[in-house]
Image (cartoon, rainbow, N blue to C red):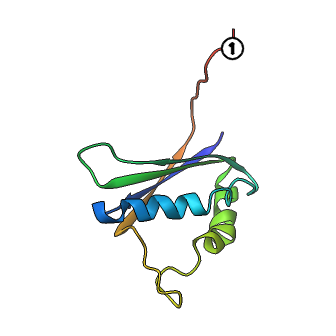
């Protein structure tokens, strides 16, 4: 079964718009990766400053290949020569294996 990776990003209120614009600007950068199945950027509604970046992959190996290659290119230079600082003040990666799933029934 697939694996799910959820990157939990601590994003101060004043950086929310910046974070969302950066994700929008690189839309499409993960979709052609081998083994990629799904992406969602989840904005907090209340009670937290944590955004969730949800990705689903065919296998752990596919995720690791993306991490070591395309992901580094997509994120570019965060705070180095370009001077662009990360919008998030911290992050944690959660990992899960999909053991059960459901989808809407087609009539």
Identify the residue shown where x is 62% and y is 73%.
Answer: 72
Q: Is residue 53 above or below residue 91?
A: above
Q: Is residue 100 above or below residue 78?
A: above
Q: Can you name the residue that lies furthest to the top here?
A: 107
Identify the residue shown where x is 34% and y is 47%.
Answer: 44
Q: Is residue 50 above or below residue 77?
A: above
Give percent across and percent down for residue 9.
39, 60
25 or 72: nearer the eye? 25
For the C terminus, the image quarter is top right
Identify the residue shown where x is 67% and y is 64%.
Answer: 66
Q: Can you name the residue that lies furthest to the left here?
A: 47
For the N terminus, the image quarter is top right
Q: Residues within 10 Å of mark 1 (few under 14, many from 20)?
A: few
Secondary structure state at the residue bearing disc 1:
loop
51 or 62: nearer the eye? 51
Give percent across and percent down for residue 6.
48, 52
Q: Looking at the image, how many numbered discs can be counted on the residues?
A: 1
User: Is residue 35 found left or right of 67 in the rendered image?
Assistant: right
Give percent across and percent down for residue 40.
54, 46
Picture quadrant where residue 38 is located: top right
């Amino acid at each position: 079964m697939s694996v799910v990776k959820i990157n939990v990003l601590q994003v101060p209120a004043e950086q929310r718009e910046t974070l969302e614009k950066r994700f929008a600007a690189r839309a499409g950068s993960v979709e052609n990766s081998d083994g990629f199945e799904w992406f969602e950027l989840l904005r907090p509604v209340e009670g937290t400053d944590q955004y969730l970046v949800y990705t689903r992959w065919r296998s752990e190996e596919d995720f690791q290949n993306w991490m070591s290659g395309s992901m580094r290119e997509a994120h570019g230079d965060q705070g180095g020569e370009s001077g662009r600082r990360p919008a998030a003040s911290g992050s944690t990666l959660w990992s899960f294996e999909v053991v059960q799933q459901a989808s809407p029934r087609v009539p």
